[in-house]
Image (cartoon, rainbow, N blue to C red):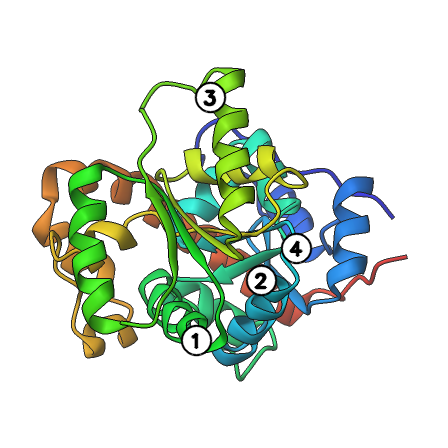
Amino acid sequence: MKTTLPQPNVFNPTLSVDKVLMPLSQPKVLSTQSSTTLIGKALPEQRVINTTVTALRFNNAMSTILQWAHGRESKAVCVANVHMLMEAYWRPEFAHNLQNADMVTPDGMPLVWMMKLLGYKGQNRVAGMDILQSLCQKASAENIKVFFLGSQQAILDQMRTRLEKDYPNLDIAAMKPLPFRPLTPSEDEAVIQEIHESGAGLVFVSLGCPKQEQWMAEHQGKVQAVMIGLGGAFPVYAGLKKWAPRWVRQAGLEWLYRLVQEPRRLFGRYFQTIPPFLFLASVQVLAHRFMPQTRDC
């Protein structure tokens, strides 16, 4: 059975329930390339809205990434929140990048709650800052080199200072900012070569959503390392932005904590993404509970 990704340009609360229920209640069908990738990785997954999210608890996700890193496997890991899922819902080309990622972790608590409601009762949060700190700790113990790509030189410098304090045995292969403009083919090839020659098994990418997901998708099979898109984790770890307290994160209120810090930048994004996500999430949960479940053929 084959389904197609819904491609609305804007959120429309007047959509008929039938039109929305059907794509949300059916399993996701991937392209041939993505299906081949998924067969190789054999990771459990749950479709949330229009994106297949990897259904692994935090420790299991970290173990999988480290196993890939030891083998210098070319993998892409996307760290998904509500904003990313709505970008994928509205933009088929971005949805394709997430389809073909090797792992999509539930960064935001709304995704975790959705996965619990849809059957993965033991799912916990696999968030960017936690991923960064856990992998740096484990990489330092397991002799895995790490490469930091993107962000700004000032942020990377402050990160290095803290990393050397927190993880004195961490082998930092390089910390390389990228220009805001697209790289020329020769520049891009030079970056790939630098990562390859560094011997890094982990590449932390900070270009912001959706640029970092696009970059990782374009470099699958080219960069022989695990690429992990961490977005805003770099400035938080560098101390330039405050990390929400644990109780705020666990309560699913990190979005509000961030909004208070950056109201001008985030108000528009949250207004555009949170209401449609709540609507679509409610529809999917109702479909899961009251409509017959369809299985892949």
The picture quadrant where one finds residue 254 is bottom left
The mark that comes first in sequence, 4 or 1, is: 4
Q: Which residue is mark 1?
A: 138
What residue type is disc 2 on? Ala
For residue 32, say whether it is visible: yes
Expressed as whole percent of the image width and height from the top left, the position of residue 130 reads 34, 69
Indicate left or right for 65 with 83 as reference: right
Q: Which mark is residue 90?
A: none
Q: Is residue 10 above or below residue 209?
A: above
Q: Quadrant of the C terminus?
A: bottom right
Residue drawn at x 40%, y 62% is 107
Q: CA distance from mark 1 to mark 2?
A: 11 Å
Q: Which residue is mark 3?
A: 187
Please state which of residues 235 and 9 is positioned toward the viewer in this rendering: 235
What residue type is disc 3 on? Glu
What is the crowding at mark 2: few (fewer than 14 residues within 10 Å), some, or many (at least 20)? many
Please state which of residues 63 and 12 is positioned toward the viewer in this rendering: 63
What residue type is disc 1 on? Lys
Are the residues flagged by discs 4 and 2 in contact, CB closer than 8 Å?
A: yes
Q: Secondary structure at mark 1?
A: helix
Residue drawn at x 17%, y 37% is 265
Q: Which residue is mark 4?
A: 73
Are the residues flagged by discs 4 and 1 in contact, CB closer than 8 Å?
A: no
Are the residues flagged by discs 1 and 3 in contact, CB closer than 8 Å?
A: no
Q: Is residue 37 above or below residue 134?
A: above
Q: Which mark is residue 69?
A: 2
Q: CA distance from mark 3 to mark 4?
A: 23 Å
Q: Secondary structure at mark 3?
A: helix
